[in-house]
Image (tube, helix red, strand yellow):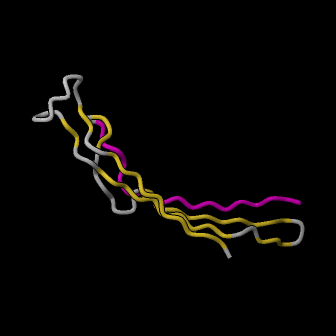
Amino acid sequence: IGSISLLARYRGHEYTTLANDARNNMLQPATAYDLTAMTSEYPLGAIALHAAASVQNLTDLQYEEVEGYPLPGRAFKFSLEFSYH
């Protein structure tokens, strides 16, 4: 029928300065999850259909990779692909 996948991205402690001063200049560790579900390719005569849906940052984690630049929260993506054979 299709597949479901869960991707976990972990980032440990990250220093924000070259001095690696852990007292004031450190971003806390963060784990973000992405969930994707996709169908197998379904033939419809000369046309084939493939569909996918995903949720990025499933838990809506608010975190930064660079100090002062927060990454986006939860995002949804849907796609339909038609191919002619």
Q: At 39% across and 62% down in the image, what residue appears?
A: 58
Quarter-of-image position of residue 47: bottom right
| Residue 78 lies in quadrant | bottom right
Say which quadrant the N terminus sits in.
bottom right
* Residue at 23 percent of width and 31 percent of height: 16
Left or right: residue 60 versus residue 38 is: left
Task: Tell whether position 74 is magenta.
Answer: yes
Q: Residue at x 22, y 40 (%)?
A: 27
Tell me where residue 7 appears, x and y as whole percent.
Answer: 47, 58
Residue drawn at point x = 24 percent, y = 23 percent: 18
**Magenta extent:** 69-85
Residue projecting furthest to the top? 18
Q: Quadrant of the C terminus?
A: bottom right
In the rendered image, which quarter is residue 40 located in?
bottom right
23 over 41 or under it: above or below: above
Q: Relative to 45, say whether 59 is above or below.
A: above
In front: 13, or 1?
13
Residue 77 vs residue 59: left or right?
right
- Residue 56, position as x, y percentages in the image: 45, 57
35 or 70, nearer to the observer: 35
Q: Nearer the viewer, residue 60 or 14?
A: 14
Q: Residue furthest bottom?
A: 1
Q: How many numbered discs, if any?
A: 0
Is residue 75 in view from this perspective?
no
78 part of magenta stretch? yes
Tell me if I can see residue 81 in this picture.
yes
Give residue 10's position: percent from left, percent from top. Answer: 36, 50
Q: Position of residue 79 (x, y in %)?
A: 62, 60
